[in-house]
Amino acid sequence: MTDTQALLKTLDFQLDIQSDNEGLLYDATLEARSAYNETIHLAKQGVDWDTIPDRVANDANLVKNTTQRVVAKALGAMENYYEYDDFGQPSHTKDGAYPLRANYEEGYNLSLTDDGDVTFRISAKPYKHVKGVLKGSDAHLDILKTALTIDEWKIGTAEALFHNENAELHVTVTNTEQTVRDKQDSRTVIGVDVNEDNVALTALSEGGVEDTLVIDFPEIKFERHRYFTMRKRVQNAGKESIHDTLEGREERFVRDRLHNVSRHIMEWSRQFEKPCIVFEDLKEMRDSIDYGTRMNRRLHHLPFRALQFYTSYKASFSGIPTGWIDPYKTSQRCPLCGHAERANRNKKRFKCRSCSHQDHSDRGASVNIAVKGIKKHQDWNVPALNSLPVVRKVRRQASGAVDAPTVTHDAVRDYQSDGIVGVSD
């Protein structure tokens, strides 16, 4: 039995600076860069690490605890270099702005107003403050407002930074009473394959496949294309204000649908014994996408990471852990015999060129994700997979409700669509 872990979240916000001194915050991030570079330079020279914080703080034009947090992060990077042979030595000539790290109620403060806004005050320089209002997603704002009003939540270190020239604040919060079970203490691994128009789920335990499900949400793809076409037309007409309005409507529509889908994923996952939800790590996916201008636009703007975040966020508040695996060949590998090649998959139909196993391609990918999740996060063996149950498909309605499961035709390989063995597409 492994220990549970406290619920820790990092919340991202945009800074609506209302003190008319955004330049002060940017200057402070440049000063933080200088503190970081000096720390790395001194460490490389062999200076005693215990003396570096005070030495750097004396030279930096920053609040002392902020300088100490920047120094701590720089020394942490040096520790990683010495601990791991394949970890590159940190540079002491870092360019550009560097995140301004600060302790709550020392380097920055947050307050909840009567209107429901969260205001901030960041000590950018000694006795010089940047003030304004936090802007961000409803989910992150709700958590932060809860942390500001309930004792069981603690607000921790934050980083002020500039991303794409926009000022942001990343705040860490911890729920001291709520815990998330360790990934290794799980009896069921749920593989989640997120696609352009659906999400496929497979629950895998030591006894085999417990259940599978495909949730269709084609309206997201259709609506995103529709809004793109409308924005293109108003942009060509020079009506920028309408363009921004349409963009906001699209974001709200997509966010609402993704929350609905993530809620259904959680409802389905809770039925299994000690579940652990596993996703593909898609952070590098966009860098490898190049299928032409039109297809690139569609794929680069798909909300893969958003759905993963909403699901993991809801899972953590249910005490359910989440894990991540390498997505390499998950959609091309046969879940039964392990043979992998591109020709195995043809859109939504999967047929193995080695063993002739047929499947819904996205469901097959979710099985492979679950298998990788077991190998990476569990100490029990992957069960033998001799057959897979019928794929159950549901579709999210505009209201957020779920249609009844459907099987469109008899399963292949002489099995009937009775929900026991086979596949339907």
Image (cartoon, grey):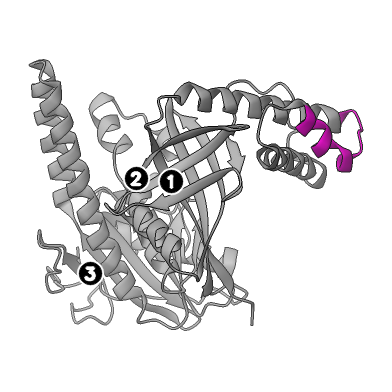
- Of 80 and 137, the residue lying toward us: 137
Q: Could you give the CA–CA distance between mark 1 and mark 3, rounded to whole angstroms?
A: 47 Å
User: Foreground mark, 1 or 3?
Assistant: 1
Residue at point 34% right, 50% down? 306
Residue at point 79% right, 30% down? 58
Q: On the picture, is 422 further left or further right than 145?
A: left
Identified by mark 1, the residue type is Asp
* N-terminal-most mark, 1 or 3: 1
**Residues at badges 1 and 2 in contact (C-beta under 8 Å)?**
yes
Q: Which mark is residue 12?
A: 1
- Residue 101 image offset from top left, x and y in percent: 60, 40
Q: On the picture, is 173 further left or further right than 111?
A: right
- State how many labels appear: 3
Crowding near the residue tagged with mark 1, few <14, some 14–19, many ≥20 C-alpha atoms within 10 Å: some
SS at circle 3: loop
Identified by mark 2, the residue type is Gly
- Of 129 and 2, the residue lying toward us: 129
User: Foreground mark, 2 or 3?
Assistant: 2
**Residue 27 in view:** yes
Q: Which residues make up the magenta segment?
A: 44-58
Mark 3 lies on residue: 412
